[in-house]
Each structure stands twice: as structure tokens, then as C-alpha cells.
Amino acid sequence: MTAQIISGRDIASEIKEELTQEIAALKAKHNLVPGLATVLVGENPASQIYVGQKEKTSQALGIYSERHDLPADTNEAELLALVDKLNKDPKIHGILVQLPLPEHINSTKVLYLIDPGKDVDAFHPVNVGKLMIGEPDFLPCTPHGIYQLLIRSGVNIKGAEVVVVGASNIVGRPVAALLSLEKEGFGGTVTLCHILTKDISVHTKRADILIVAVGKPKLVTADMVKNGVVVIDVGTNRIGKTAEGKDILVGDVDFEAVKEKAKAITPVPGGVGPMTIAMLMMNTVKAAKLAAGLA
Ligand code: NAD
């Protein structure tokens, strides 16, 4: 069996096209322009690229975008004051503080100050809690991206054995909570594995849907999966540079070997990665609609 390759690039483009139309309609019918503020502290090169991509995508879709680049020596009080100002700004519906923050700033304090209604990353405990009780306003971007990849590729989640490897607060835990919701379109039977799991292969071998978010190249090999599995590889590992000096990226799954057994699989790069920004845009539109009483 050779797997269907689930293209995050294509699915993210499809979603961005839908959002562009929705944003144009909000503008035309309600004079509502969704607004996103990004906040970057310091000059971390990867963070600068991520924030740049978010800004560029917002503008391409018709979202009002505001970028706040602060020097590395910005103190916590200054950053908290900026978040407070953005919380009160009616043009801004979504606030994204790019992580990691410099060590002298308490990230938790900053993230907890973001108005939960503008928390488009969905990291605030209010939004985490709403997901846990099955009433989310916003879904965290990477888990939501994984969900969209599955449903837009026609994968049935209801009743499926879903195994998630990696239990971080930004990927593993929320995706496990999301896919196990007892609601139409969800309803997986989810097993969540992590570093303390005795033998992950006992679980991965049972999976109809296997989601791997650990950060270890080739953690999942072909002998650890069953025929016909659907694999979502979230791992993003830099294993070297090309002759042109570009990063060589691989996932957590031995792609070449596992694709011979899988029904469908995401590549790295070009799988989950492109979805995360598309979901941030979706959350910004949702935040604007919620603020305007349209959602
Ligand atoms: P993390 O480091 O916060 O958590 C890793 C998790 O993996 C932990 O729960 C840990 O217990 C578990 N783990 C570690 N070794 C293990 C092992 N041998 N067996 C089983 N479980 C093990 O990681 P994270 O922030 O969730 O990121 C995971 C990977 O996903 C990274 O490669 C990261 O770059 C990538 N990622 C990609 C995106 C994207 O948009 N594509 C977004 C977020 C994270």
C-alpha cells in the first residue's frame, strides 16, 4: 500500500481562500475588519520569521495587522502594559505574543493577562478549560490544524482508535481533548503516550489514527504501526543544512518506511506546519465575530 500524502500546504491554502471570502463579506456587510496584533520581544531569528509570516498572511487575507517589535531588554511591566493596551483596543481582536519570551519575563504572567476573548493562540487557562468541557471559543492552532487535516482528508474520527504520542500543553494534550469530544465530527477513543509510557509501540500498533508530537527523528518506525493507519507527524526536527544553507527538516516518523504501510500520512515539511498559521487566522476572524456578536 502506498499512502495518500496529506498536503498541509494545499489544505491551508483552501482554508485561507475561504477566510479571504469571509473577511471580505464581514467588511461589506458589517463594516467589520478583524484585527491581529503580534508582539515580539528580542531578536530571536526563528521568532522573527514566524511573526513575519503571521503578519504577511494576515495582510494577504485582509486582516488589519499591527506588529509590535520590542527590544530584548524590555521589562515585564512594559510588556504587561502593552498587552493591557491591546486588550482595550477595539481595532484588535486577536493578540499573539510570540514565544519564547526572554528569561527575565514571566511568560505565564503575560499570557494570563491576555483577554481570553482575544487569546487567538488559545493558551489562556479559560480557553484551555473551555476545550476540556467541550465548549471551546477558540481551539489551539496546531491541534485545530491537525483536526482540519483529518476531516478535510475524509478521515473518520468517530469510534477510531486514536493514539497521540507526546503530551505537551500546546499539542498532545489539547489534541487528545479535542479528538475525544463526544460530539458529531469527533468521538475518537484516545490514548495519550509520553516519556513515562512503558512501551509506546504497544499503543502505536493499535492506532487507526496516530499523531506524533515529540521532537525525535524516526521515533516511530514501520514495525510500530499497523497497515492502513493514518499518520499525522507534528515533529519538526532540524537535522542539518543543505548545500545552500537551508535547514533540513524531518518529522518524528520514519516517513519513507511508514508510508508503505499507512493509508494516509503527512510529510515534514508541508504537513502540519502550514496549518498552524491558517488556524491563527481562523481564530482572529472568530474573535472579531464574537466581539461583534456575530458568532
Ligand atoms: P515538548 O518538548 O513540549 O513535549 C514533548 C512531549 O513528548 C512530552 O510530552 C514528552 O513526555 C514526550 N516524549 C519525549 N520523548 C518521548 C519518547 N521517547 N516517547 C514518548 N514520548 C516522549 O514538545 P512540543 O512543543 O509538543 O513539540 C513536539 C514536536 O512538535 C517538536 O518537534 C516541535 O518542533 C513540533 N511542533 C510543530 C508544530 C507545527 O506547527 N508544525 C507546532 C508545535 C510543535
Image (cartoon, grey):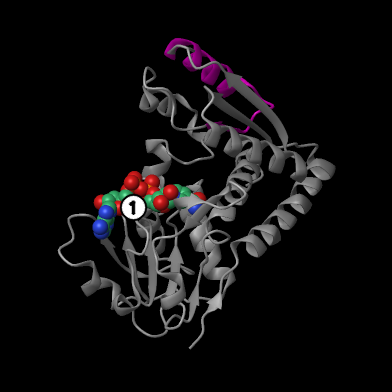
Residue 239 visible (yes or no): yes
Position of residue 87 relative to residue 153, above or below, is above
| Residue 108, x across and y down, in percent | 36, 28
Q: Residues within 10 Å of mark 1 (few under 14, many from 20)?
A: some
What's the residue at 57%, 18% (across, down)? 70
Left or right: 91, with 185 as reference point? right
Please tell me whether residue 86 belongs to the stretch shown in magenta.
Answer: yes
Quickly name the residue at label 1: 173
| Residue 206, x across and y down, in percent | 29, 78
| Residue 264, x across and y down, in percent | 50, 77
Seen from the viewer's position, the closer of residues 293 and 122 is: 122
Q: Within the image, what quadrant is residue 210 found in?
A: bottom left
What's the residue at 46%, 54% (across, down)? 143
Position of residue 69 relative to residue 181, above or below, is above
Identity, as a three-letter code, of the amino acid under mark 1 = Arg
| Residue 111, x across and y down, in percent | 43, 29
Left or right: 125, with 147 as reference point? left
Please tell me whether residue 4 belongs to the stretch shown in magenta.
Answer: no
Q: Is mark 1 within 8 Å of ligand 1?
A: no
From this viewpoint, which residue is outermost toward the front? Answer: 243
Seen from the viewer's position, the closer of residues 10 and 62 is: 10
From this viewpoint, which residue is outermost toward the bottom? Answer: 1
Left or right: 15, with 261 as reference point? right
Residue 168 visible (yes or no): no
State the count of labels.
Answer: 1
Seen from the viewer's position, the closer of residues 94 and 4 is: 4
Q: Secondary structure at mark 1?
A: helix
From this viewpoint, which residue is outermost toward the left? Answer: 198
Position of residue 1 relative to residue 204, above or below, is below
Q: Magenta region: which residues?
A: 76-97
What's the residue at 70%, 43% (across, down)? 57
